[in-house]
Amino acid sequence: MNEILKILERDGRLTGKQIAAMLGKTNDEISDAIAEYEAQGAILKYTAIIDWERAASERVTALIEVKISPQRGDGFDRIAERIYQYDEVDSLYLMSGSFDLTVIMSADSMRDVAEFVYAKLATIDGVTGTATHFILKKYKEKGCVFKKPEQQEERMIFV
């Protein structure tokens, strides 16, 4: 039944009836499975992917590398919990490599991102360094391609 999760991850607006038809199951089987996934916490939220550029809204998305000193007994978890509580944080990941955490955030301006980094993130005990990267253009997110609609050429037929 993991197929249901894969389908919902691609398009959370599909109905149980549509998923049932795709998988050759009954609507009741799909509805029960989805309810169980929600109860288990496997399905956390249904969201939409927005192309803010097309929506004529200026949004800035930043990826922030965070270096931290792990806490005795809690490792990275206590600091991660403190960071993900901020409303500005869209996503937070523990990483391998040259830094420890990746924070993804969206804001109305670069100034808002900078203020979050220097006033909130960098002041957390255990945070030893940050590096902020701004996303200049989105090409693809969660399997969804961002591309402008192609302009149709004017065609004339002469008879």
Image (cartoon, grey):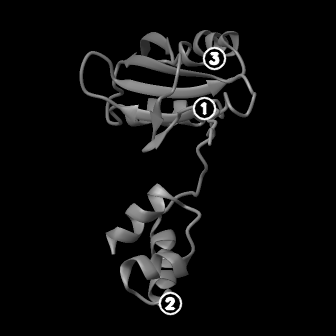
Q: Earlier in the sequence, mark 1 or mark 3?
A: 3
Choose the circle earlier in sequence order: 2 or 3.
Answer: 2
Q: Quadrant of residue 153?
A: top right
Q: Secondary structure at mark 3?
A: helix
Q: Is residue 136 left or right of residue 65?
A: right
Q: Nearer the viewer, mark 1 or mark 3?
A: 1
Q: Residue 115 sits in which quadrant?
A: top right
Q: Secondary structure at mark 2?
A: helix
Q: Furthest-right residue in view?
A: 56
User: Label 1, on which residue?
Assistant: 153
| Residue bearing mark 2 | 28
Most extreme residue toward the left is 97
Tell me which numbered mark, 2 or 1, is placed earlier along the sequence.
2
Report which residue position mark 3 lands on.
116
x and y percentages locating residue 17 in the rendered image? 54, 82
What x and y, as percent, mark residue 85? 59, 37
The residue under label 2 is which amino acid type?
Asp
At mark 1, the secondary structure is: loop
Give the crowd class for mark 1: few <14, some 14-19, many >=20 residues within 10 Å.
few
* Distance between the alpha carbons at the discs numbered 1 and 3: 46 Å
Mark 2 or 1, closer to the camera: 1
Q: Looking at the image, which residue is at 56% across and 35% down?
A: 90
Mark 2 neighbour density, 10 Å: few (under 14) some (14–19) many (20 or more): few
Q: Is residue 46 above or below residue 120?
A: below
